[in-house]
Image (cartoon, helix red, strand yellow):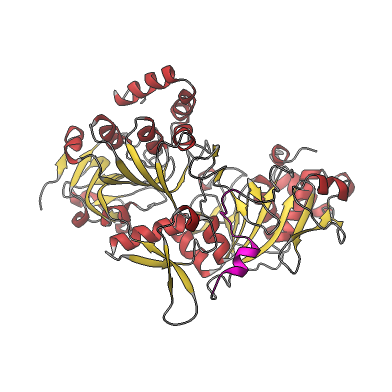
Amino acid sequence: MSATDATRAEVCVVACADAWRGSGEILAHAVGIVPTIGARLAKLTFEPDLVLTDGDCFLMSEPPPLGRNASAGGTIESWAPFRRVFEILATGRRHSMMGASQIDRFGNQNISSIGDWRRPTRQLIGVRGAPGNTANHRVDYWVGGHSTRVFVEAVDVVSGVGNDRARAQPGGALRFHDLGVVVTDLAVLDYDAEGRLKVRSLHPGVTAAEVAESTGFAIDTGSAGTTRLPTPEELELIRTVLDPQGLRDKEVRS
Amino acid sequence: MADKTMQLSDVASHVRSGMTVGIGGWGSRRKPMALVRELLRSDATDLTVVVFGGPDVGLLCAAGKVKRLVYGFVSLDSIPLDPHFRAARESGTIATTEYDEGMFVTALRAGAARMSFLPSRAGLGSDVLAMNPELRTVASPYDDDVYVAVPGIRMDLALIHLNRADAAGNGQYLGPDPYFDDLYAMAADRCIMSVERIVPTEELTADAAPQTLLVGRMFVSGVVEAPGGAHFTSCDPDYGRDEAVQREYAEAARDPGTWAAFEQRFLAEGTR
């Protein structure tokens, strides 16, 4: 298995895994297939102390098959029903990678509704835990379809708090606010000193112009490197252990 | 100990228009669907519904029972968005109090503790404050932190569904997650609890750990035996979610005629 035949989805998985580098012994909260495989890959390789969940209420030392909960297998190491999750996130010992229906240049994220919230043109799921996650611990985002519909000038309902708002907050109550990276199917983005999104790396085969055209605000691509390829060991783990059914290809087309 | 058992047909007599009603469970999990059915059958309207929402919300919205919805989210889990809730929101027919999930729990805890508010870090900087302009912040007396002062929620009535209870109202959950049903019971003036099975008190702990006794009888005013009372949502370990019926429920939203037929079947308990 050679690293150069890695698919785009596999490049994304490894980019997501790298987001957990240095996280240590904290709860990995990953929403979506690619972020979930990424967190599991990180635990199997460079972050062995990471704490994984089954997506329901169990913490798993060995995760169940992808997309299933503890009733389908794996090893339960602890219990975290929803009430415990809110307690854990307030301690800060958690790190999220969530989705985003909209995201702006400062990393304000929307999953609540599109249009005027009083009478939205499209009701989404609600803010869910995004305000609390961004107020309490590091949050990254995963966007499987990088487009001007997602990367917008201004989001309709700020669910996850962006850098501009966090910095404008009086007092120290948002001192745990910590936005890390945004991994998309085209690139890995992070934030500059002013808290604005910039391109950290382009996935192999993607041009800076392509990312700029797919982003609804001006974005700095000047310092962009190339996203690393999976190692042969990582590819082996992704293909044979973590996602033998290829569910990752549902979120990222090659 | 007083016997608090009652029949499903008694439930409607405890509901009045304009009430604030909390509904336990989470998403499409352990929802008191048999009790919600009685709510639908009652003539009560203009309800304020407090909820981690699932199909209970969709059914009540579709029936025009809801004046205001107080929620952390509304989802059917295996189907991300409830079409009836979406329709109610997109037609602007319900007022909403949308909270962060953690804020919602803080509001329940404050209500249960009879506090006017509890402080929360969650919500700061987000549009939850813009969407709920009545929310205030509070300055810490100890440092320069400023928090959201989440107002306590008190409910006139809470409806919850558990696996087992005794006739006095000691409720037991046997699944993996208690959700927040104990908090609903404590934050409400009255709580009606349906269960899969009413058993003698000594049977509750005969084959289950005492930690499964989630709801104490001080917080329960009525107990209803309703086997399958959470159907088509899940009630582990008694039964999982009936995905086929949930799909029917969601798809029926596309057409008023199909929906009327589904709703009629649901009210006649014919979806089981």
B205 drawn magenta? no
Residue A210 occupies quadrant: top right
**In this picture, residue A120 sits left or right of residue A235:** left
Question: For the magenta stretch, what is the residue range?
Answer: A156-170
Dominant SS of magenta comes to loop
Is residue A25 among what the camera can see?
Answer: no
Among all residues in the image, which is located at the extreme bottom? B142
Name the residue nearer the viewer: B197 or A209.
A209
**Which residue is located at x 16 percent, y 37 percent?**
B13
Q: Position of residue A156 (x, y in %)?
A: 59, 48
Q: Position of residue A84 (x, y in %)?
A: 45, 60
Name the residue nearer the viewer: B261 or B84.
B84
> Split into 4 quadrants, where in the image is the C terminus of chain A?
top right
**In this picture, residue A144 sits left or right of residue B259:** right
**In this picture, residue B260 sits left or right of residue A95:** left
Q: Where is residue A116 in the image (x, y as percent from the top left)?
A: 54, 44
Residue B23 occupies quadrant: top left
Q: Is residue B120 above or below residue A234?
A: below
**Which residue is located at x 60 percent, y 64 percent?**
A165
Name the residue nearer the viewer: A89 or B86.
B86
Q: Where is residue A166 in the image (x, y as percent from the top left)?
A: 60, 66
Q: How many labels does the image show?
A: 0
**In this picture, residue B173 sits left or right of residue B177:** left
Is residue B230 among what the camera can see?
Answer: yes
